[in-house]
Amino acid sequence: MRISRLKPVTACILVPAILAGCGEGYSDLRQFVRDSEKSVTRKIDPLPQVKPFAPFAYEGFDLPDPFKPRKLAIKQENAGANAPDLNRRKEPLEAFPLEQIKMVGTLYQNGVMFALVRADRTLYRVKKGNYLGQNFGLIVDVSDSEIKLKEIVQDTAGDWTERESILPLLEGPAPGGR
């Protein structure tokens, strides 16, 4: 006999009877849960004792602050002859790092030797006394094969030091040139 052929009244009586039979096998489990609840002690621990706050007196105000550049500020004031003139008006080629400036030729005009340098696809004419690069690079000599510079850089201690740099003549055709 199929369940679908049962009359609805018979199905309403039969289904709850089957479901009621399933619930009786768990009486031992219900008894275990009741017994377990009785054996568990429900004691809440008291709050910990609050310790009184002891203020700390900081006595390091006389020590130098490691986050202030005191040493650099003192060195800049007493930098001496090596310090660059920070108030001097910058020349256009001081906006470029020395690595981006290329010497592409020379020009002799009115008894003065000029160097032709390329920076950012623009050709510039420079001579002794002009500045190049971002490290206060003063041109001290221009020859057919190179430009000699005296740069002023700041070391890690804040001291200004001089160093010599050379910008050699670019061999072969200049990139982007004709």
Image (spheres, rainbow, N blue to C red):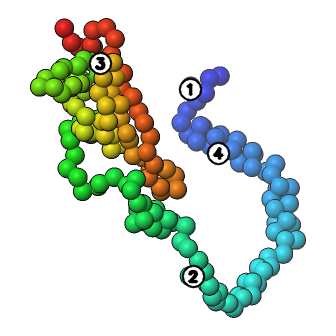
Helix, strand or loop at label 4? It is: helix
Mark 1 or 3, nearer chain start:
1
Mark 2 or 1, nearer chain start:
1
- Label 3 sits on residue: 144
Q: Residue 75, how many percent across, how many down?
A: 45, 63
- Label 1 sits on residue: 4
Mark 4 or 3, nearer chain start:
4
In the displayed structure, would residue 41 be above or below residue 52? above
Disc 1 from disc 3: Cα separation: 109 Å
Disc 2 from disc 1: Cα separation: 95 Å
Between residue 146 and residue 90, name the one nearer to us.
Answer: 146
Which residue corresponds to the image point at 62% horizontal and 85% vertical from the top-left?
Answer: 59
In the displayed structure, would residue 92 be above or below residue 23? above
Q: Tag 2: Cα neighbours inside 10 Å, few (<14), some, or many (≥20)?
A: few
- Label 4 sits on residue: 16
Between residue 144 and residue 102, name the one nearer to us.
Answer: 144
Marks 3 & 2, CB-CB < 8 Å contact: no
Marks 4 & 2, CB-CB < 8 Å contact: no
User: In the image, what residue type sits under mark 2?
Assistant: Asp
- Label 2 sits on residue: 62
Between residue 123 and residue 9, name the one nearer to us.
Answer: 123
Helix, strand or loop at label 2? It is: loop
Mark 3 or 2, nearer chain start:
2
